[in-house]
Image: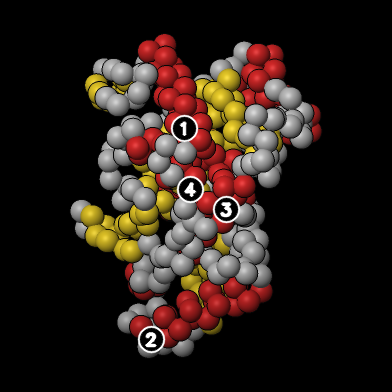
Amino acid sequence: MELSKANILKILEKIDKKDFKIINLNIFGEEIILDISTTNPTLQSKKNIQNSIKKLIQENINSEFDLKTNFKVEKAEITSNQIKGEPIKGIKNIIAIASGKGGVGKSTVTSNLAISLSKMGFKVGILDADIYGPSIPIMFDIADARPLSITIDGKNKMKPVENYGIKILSIGFFTKPDQAVIWRGPMASKALNQMIFDADWGNLDFLLVDLPPGTGDIHLSILQALPVTGSIIVSTPQNIALADARKGIAMFKQKSINVPVLGLIENMAYFTPYELPENKYYIFGKHGAKNLSDDMKVKFLGEVPIVQSIREASDFGHPASLQEDSKISLTFRDITKNMVSELVKRNKDLPPSEILKITTMAGCSAVNKKNE
């Protein structure tokens, strides 16, 4: 093949130019001069580009030539790994459960709300968005489980792990028990993106999103991308936890986020010894979360006492709400009823895609789902 500009350009069409682009080409006798734009400033990258171009030309041009390359380093385009969300087909309500402060029992509340909702006849899933400290797999006795890969409409999807009738996805399924997740925000957001949009959640009435503590990158990635129906704040009664819970409520109420706060749950509200069932000891303070709900004008959904069986049930992977007619099961049932009641009010005031109407709130025994 003759050494000409047209031939060289035709040859270079065959090369993979994902890391660079050719700005200009000139030929002077046997000298080929290429101006190349690249976003990789390293000498190794430039050398690799030059060698691949030279090899390709040598394989197609019979005559001798001398290749010279001039590189112009361009600033790399910053791409965001923030979840680019849209409504998830088949999921009617997405509830974000947050705490502000860590260690207040947010995941315990999430797991028991899920069980209570399931008992009421709802189809429920949990997205464990606590990337750095996932605990939902342990609480559902599925720590060793792994999601299966299935094909839906020609695309590979993750099938959530299911136990006690709850569909679950967590980063804990993809890491070893002693492996720390040391990721920056973009990597964490990318992992969440896969668990949300590359999963076959099927039809759900509720997807509960168990958020990590604080008000950071993961929260924004979820809240700015998904059609979150409402949020729930979990706190203990002590002032240091309430201060963070206040920030969590403020985050959801910001105009740029504007996610309705369905209510506040007080965990570890009081301790009642087995031997003294009528006594209540307010170890962390009395009615702190209830007072905060009044102050912030959000619904107080209820209080959960310090009970050994809750801790034992979580550790053994058997949420306490599974115990039929136990005091704790009834407590979470009442809290869940209050939450659903607030959700119905919220969906009447704002234009949701679908409204859940409870026809028998007293027992939550009948659930009607009606499209608006």
Q: Earlier in the sequence, mark 3 or mark 4?
A: 3
Which secondary structure lies at badge 3? helix
Three-letter code for the amino acid on which mark 3 is drawn: Glu
Viewer-proximal residue among 23 and 318: 318
Which of labels 3 and 4 is toward the front?
A: 3
Distance from disc 3 to disc 4, alpha carbons, whole Å, reads: 9 Å
Question: Which of the 4 quarters of the picture holds residue 149?
Answer: bottom left
Amino acid type at image mark 4:
Pro
Q: Earlier in the sequence, mark 2 or mark 1?
A: 2
Q: Quadrant of residue 179?
A: bottom right
Vertical comparison of 274 with 353: above or below: below
The quadrant of the picture occupied by the N terminus is bottom left
Q: State left or right for residue 326 relative to residue 105.
A: left
Crowd around label 3: few <14 · some 14–19 · many ≥20 (10 Å): some
Type of the residue with mark 1: Leu
**Residue underneath mark 1:** 330
Q: Do callouts 3 and 1 mark residues in contact (Cβ within 8 Å)?
A: no
Residue highlighted by disc 2: 59
**Residue bearing mark 4:** 319
Quick one: label 1, few (<14), some, or many (20+) residues within 10 Å?
some
